[in-house]
Amino acid sequence: MKTIDALARGLEVLRSLEERRGQSLAELHRATGVPKPSLLRILDTLEQGGFAWRAIGDGRYRRRVSLIFRPGIDDELLRIGEIAAPFLEALRRKVIWPSDVLVHRNFQMEIVETSRRQSHLNVAVYAIGFRVEMFLSAPGRAYLAFCSDAERAAVLADAAANPPVLARARQVLAGELPAILDETRRLGYASRDPLFGGDGDKEMNVSDDGIDAIAVPVMHDGKLLATMNLVWPRKYRLKAQIVRSHLADLQDTAAAIAAAAAETEKRSTE
C-alpha cells in the first residue's frame, strides 16, 4: 500500500521532537533529512495544530507535553514553560525587561522558559534548564516563601545535609531566612540578595552576572506551580521603580499563567 509522503515526513519530524531538550531547525534537518523549506512548513503546521511548540528562551522546537501518553515529572514541569511562553513575551513587550519562569527540581530552581533571548537590553542570558540557587536568588526565595510547609522542610533538610557552597547562603540559613521569607510574604514578592552574583558555585567577586531581580509565585488554588521573575541590570538601581511600576504587571502575568495551566490540566482530565 502506498504511503502519504507528506504525512510520513511530518510524523518523522514529530518523532524527532520527542527529545525533551528540544531540537533546532538545523538539528531536525540533520535528523530527518527533510529540506529546510519543507521542514519549516511542517513545523508551522504542527505548531498551528497544537502538536509542537517553539520555546522563546532558546528557539528550539519541542513536542507538546499534552501529547505524551504518560508524562513523567520532568514533562509536567516542562508544561509550565510551554504554557508560559506567550505570557512572558507579552510582559516583555509591555515592561521592556525580560523574565524567567522557574520550577523547583532537586532542591534548585530550574528555568523552563525565558524571554531574555528576545530582549536586546544588557542582561545576562541563561538557557532553559539552567539551575538557580535557592536561598539568595529571587525565584528561590519566592518558592520558599509560598510553598507548603512540607516542601520547605524538605529543602531545608537537604541544605542541612548538603550545605550551600556560597558563604552568604550559609549565613542566610544560619538565621536570616525566616525574616526574609516573612518579608517576602508581606510584600508579595521576593528580592535577589545584593551579595549574590547569579552563580550558585562561585562567590560574587569571582562570578557576577550584573543583574538584579524580583520574583513572584505562580499559584492556583493555593498550590505553588512555579515562580516568575523580572530582571534588569543592577547598575541602573531600578528596583524601587520596577516595584512601583511593574510589580502588578508581573503578578497579573503570573496569575494568567497559573489560570492557563489549570485550564490545560482540566482539559487533559476530561
Image: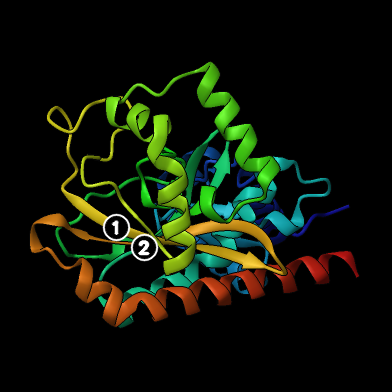
Q: Which of 140 and 109 is in front in this view?
A: 140
Amino acid at the residue labelled 2: Ser
Residue pictured at 29% horizontal, 34% vertical: 199
Q: Nearer the viewer, residue 7 or 189?
A: 189
Q: Percent x, y for residue 53?
A: 56, 62
Residue pictured at 31% horizontal, 51% vertical: 192
* Rendered position, 100 above or below 27: below
Q: Residue 94 carries which label?
A: none
Query: Is residue 197 shown left or right of residue 59?
Result: left
Q: Nearer the viewer, residue 42 or 186?
A: 186
Residue pictured at 63% horizontal, 58% vertical: 224
Residue at the disc numbered 2 = 99
Query: Is residue 215 shown left or right of residue 15?
Result: left
Q: Is mark 2 on a helix, strand or loop?
A: loop
Q: What element carries label 1?
A: strand
Residue at the disc numbered 1 = 213
Q: Percent x, y for residue 239?
A: 21, 66
Measure the alpha-carbon separation of dots 1 and 2: 9 Å
Amino acid at the residue labelled 1: Ala
